[in-house]
Image: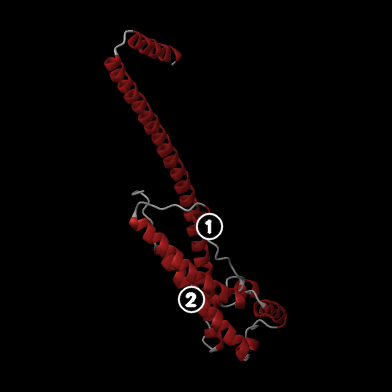
């Protein structure tokens, strides 16, 4: 680089020394053009490096989002299983109280019966949390629409789960669990007392309703397919 500068200086001195002003002007213009070309090349290289870094960053974010999306789907699938079992057992309680017991669930202990009826679960989405921490605009319109649908459906699930947990993990759920365990020691037909308690039955019906609402939303959420190939 220093050698090139020395060469240019010597050329300028020689042209000025020989009083060749026209040639000097042409040389100066040529030197300016070379400088401009050098700047353009440097800018081009810098833009290329920035583009490559952005692509690498996007690839890392997409990989993280895919992992969190898969984690969410596994979690919601697990919740779907428990909700399905909970609805099944709540229906059996209703049938039991109506005098139409279901043979497949006879003889259940309070622990087995309440395992999927009581107890709350979280609605937090790791996928949506990652989107908040790493906001990114996807090129695919279909992907953006799928994410919007995912966010909307998740918002509905949050409401359902809050109502579900209000009944399942609050004072009602805890009291029901303890009373069933206590009554089971004295009677095999430990549900008979609850069939005569309208308050308990209303709350069990409400719990059944929220389980079904949440189950419907989760199933719709699990049906949302996000196509990442077009990124």
Residue 148 x, y percent position in the rendering: 41, 63
Residue pictured at 43% horizontal, 38% vertical: 50
Query: In this view of the protein, can residue 108 be seen by the observer?
Result: no
38 above or below 157? above
Query: In this view of the protein, can residue 34 be seen by the observer?
Result: yes
Residue pictured at 63% horizontal, 87% vertical: 194
For the residue pair 102 and 212, the one nearer the viewer reads as 212
Q: Earlier in the sequence, mark 1 or mark 2?
A: 1
Which element is circle 2 on? Answer: helix
Q: Is residue 123 left or right of residue 139?
A: right
Q: Which mark is residue 163?
A: none
Residue 183 x, y percent position in the rendering: 70, 82
Q: Is residue 174 left or right of residue 96?
A: right
Residue 179 x, y percent position in the rendering: 70, 81
Mark 2 crowd level (few <14, some 14–19, many ≥20, 10 Å Cα): some
For the residue pair 186 and 167, the one nearer the viewer reads as 167
Quadrant of the rendering where the N terminus is positioned: top left
Mark 1 crowd level (few <14, some 14–19, many ≥20, 10 Å Cα): few
Residue that carries the numbered disc 1 in the rendered image = 129
State which quadrant residue 200 falls in. Answer: bottom right
Which element is circle 1 on? Answer: helix
Residue that carries the numbered disc 2 in the rendered image = 212
44 above or below 7? below
């Amino acid at each position: 680089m220093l050698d090139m500068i020395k060469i240019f200086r010597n050329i300028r001195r020689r042209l000025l020394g020989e009083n060749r002003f026209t040639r000097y002007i042409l040389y100066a213009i040529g030197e300016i053009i070379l400088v401009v070309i050098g700047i353009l090349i440097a800018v081009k290289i810098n833009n290329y490096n920035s583009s490559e870094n952005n692509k690498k960053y996007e690839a890392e974010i997409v990989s993280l989002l895919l992992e969190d999306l898969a984690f969410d789907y596994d979690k919601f699938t697990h919740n779907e299983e428990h909700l399905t079992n909970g609805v099944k057992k709540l229906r059996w309680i209703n049938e039991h109280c109506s005098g139409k017991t279901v043979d497949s669930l006879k003889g259940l202990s309070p622990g087995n019966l309440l395992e999927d009826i009581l107890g709350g679960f979280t609605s937090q989405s790791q996928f949506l949390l990652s989107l908040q921490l790493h906001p990114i605009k996807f090129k695919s319109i279909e992907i953006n629409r799928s994410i919007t649908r995912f966010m909307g459906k998740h918002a509905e699930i949050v409401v359902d789960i809050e109502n579900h947990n209000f009944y399942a993990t609050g004072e009602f759920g805890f009291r029901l669990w303890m009373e069933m365990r206590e009554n089971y020691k004295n009677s095999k037909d430990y549900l008979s007392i609850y069939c005569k308690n309208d308050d308990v039955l209303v709350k069990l019906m409400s719990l059944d309703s929220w389980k079904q609402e949440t189950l419907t939303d989760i199933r719709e959420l699990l049906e949302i397919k996000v196509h990442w190939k077009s990124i």
